[in-house]
Image (spheres, grey):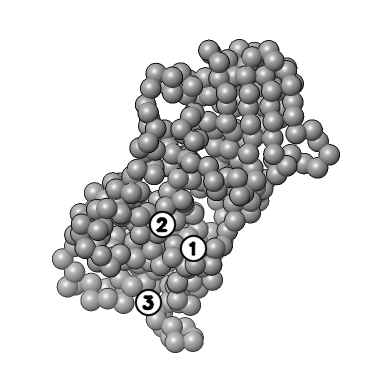
């Protein structure tokens, strides 16, 4: 059971994500299902109310805010499944509340989702769960992976893979303050009670998160822009499987080195020469869709982050307009020590 969801929330969230059959949304549980509030039919990504009754208007109000709530939860948690859990928990709490007395349902729901996500993040940190290397798996590009890997891949792309990776390095309170204020314009006086601090302290939390996300210590220079252009040209060519374009950005004597975690046992960890490096890049072109340019220790590099989960970082040495060295890092401990930041669009 993930995060701090109640048994009721977990069971209902599980049923809520089912795409194979209609389901029942249950009332509060005390060890058993003691009532049925509404019957829904799941039409893929959308769920609709198929019964009449006084709950219709409340559910319609909730549905009108679903996209916003899911956006908040996904940026907080970086996981579509967990985001759906948090959104469903918000619906459960709304359905049990005195909704008629709420002046701002959207604001109330945003606060509930944020608090649920914060509890889940704190629980995740406390258990030190989900090591980075747990995500290095072909399941991210398999049609059999999870309920809808393509939808989550598209969602991760829309948010920004590098941003999701950097957000995951923030402390839970920093992440909440930054996401709510900088991404959703929630005032600090509303954020403060969620983290149990003053508005000024909440502002500081968001500021610390912002510095980490933006890589504030990095000098934005012409050299960095040049590095980024070369790295993004390399990535674009790898995605397209363009042999000639890859050769164009590689020095003839380029060297690619990889750590033990990045290379299957028995294979060489060092590749020399442009043609050999191109062959390696073409073999990995299927995974290039999960890659994005990012700041790595203050320089332009690439991150491989399936669904926003960091698995590999590539650093580059660039001379002129050519890549002369590439290092591939997949060891979880080395990944944790890297200083990563999202590049501005």
What residue is pinned by disc 2? 171
| Residue 229 position in % (x across, y down) | 48, 20
What residue is pinned by disc 3? 37
* Inter-mark Cα distance, 3 to 2: 38 Å
Q: Is residue 310 left or right of residue 104?
A: right
| Residue 344 position in % (x across, y down) | 37, 32
Q: Residue at x 62, y 49 (%)?
A: 332
* Inter-mark Cα distance, 3 to 1: 35 Å
Q: The C terminus is located in which quarter?
A: top left
Could you say which disc has been placed on residue 125 in the image?
1
Could you say which disc has been placed on residue 286 in the image?
none
- Circle 2/circle 1 CB separation < 8 Å: yes
Q: Is residue 194 above or below residue 73?
A: below
| Residue 114 position in % (x across, y down) | 34, 61
Q: Is residue 154 left or right of residue 102?
A: right
Viewer-side residue, 40 vs 106: 106
Q: Residue at x 63, y 16 (%)?
A: 250
- Going from the N terminus, do you reach mark 2 or mark 1 first? 1
Callout in the foreground (3, 1):
1
| Numbered disc 2: secondary structure | loop
Q: Residue at x 39, y 32 (%)?
A: 218
- Circle 3/circle 1 CB separation < 8 Å: no
Q: Is residue 251 above or below residue 332?
A: above
Viewer-side residue, 27 vs 335: 335
The answer to whether residue 249 is visible is: yes
Q: Is residue 71 above or below residue 29?
A: above
Label 3 crowd (10 A; few <14 / some 14-19 / many >=20): some
Number of disc labels: 3
Locate residue 314: give its quadrant: top right
- Going from the N terminus, do you reach mark 3 or mark 1 first? 3
| Residue 335 position in % (x across, y down) | 57, 45
């Amino acid at each position: 059971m993930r995060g701090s969801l109640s048994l009721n929330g977990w069971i209902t969230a599980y049923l809520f994500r089912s795409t194979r059959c209609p389901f029942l949304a249950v009332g509060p549980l005390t060890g058993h299902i003691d009532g049925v509030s509404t019957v829904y039919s799941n039409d893929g990504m959308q769920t609709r109310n198929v019964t009449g009754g006084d709950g219709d208007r409340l559910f319609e109000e909730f549905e009108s805010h679903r996209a916003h709530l899911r956006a908040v939860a996904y940026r907080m948690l970086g996981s579509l499944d967990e985001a759906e859990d948090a959104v469903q928990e918000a619906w459960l709490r709304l359905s049990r509340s005195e909704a008629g007395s709420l002046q701002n349902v959207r604001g109330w729901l945003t606060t509930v989702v944020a608090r649920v996500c914060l509890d889940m993040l704190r629980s995740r940190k406390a258990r030190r769960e989900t090591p980075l290397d747990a995500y290095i798996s072909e399941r991210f590009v398999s049609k059999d992976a999870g309920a809808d890997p393509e939808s989550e891949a598209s969602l991760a792309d829309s948010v920004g893979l590098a941003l999701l990776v950097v957000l995951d390095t923030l402390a839970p309170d920093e992440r909440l303050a930054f996401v709510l204020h900088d991404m959703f314009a929630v005032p600090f006086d509303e954020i403060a009670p969620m983290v149990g601090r003053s508005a000024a302290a909440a502002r500081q939390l968001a500021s610390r998160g912002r510095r980490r996300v933006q890589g504030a210590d990095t000098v934005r220079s012409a050299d960095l822009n040049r590095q980024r252009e070369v790295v993004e040209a390399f990535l674009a060519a790898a995605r397209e499987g363009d042999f000639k374009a890859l050769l164009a950005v590689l020095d003839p004597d380029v060297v690619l080195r990889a750590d033990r975690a990045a290379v299957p046992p028995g294979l060489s960890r060092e590749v020399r020469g442009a043609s050999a490096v191109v062959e390696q890049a073409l073999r990995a072109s299927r995974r290039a869709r999960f890659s994005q340019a990012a700041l790595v220790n203050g320089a332009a590099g690439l991150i491989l982050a399936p669904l926003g989960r960091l698995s590999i970082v590539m650093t580059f040495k660039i001379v002129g307009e050519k890549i002369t060295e590439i290092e591939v890092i997949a060891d979880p401990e080395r990944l944790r020590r890297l200083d990563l930041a999202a590049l501005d669009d």
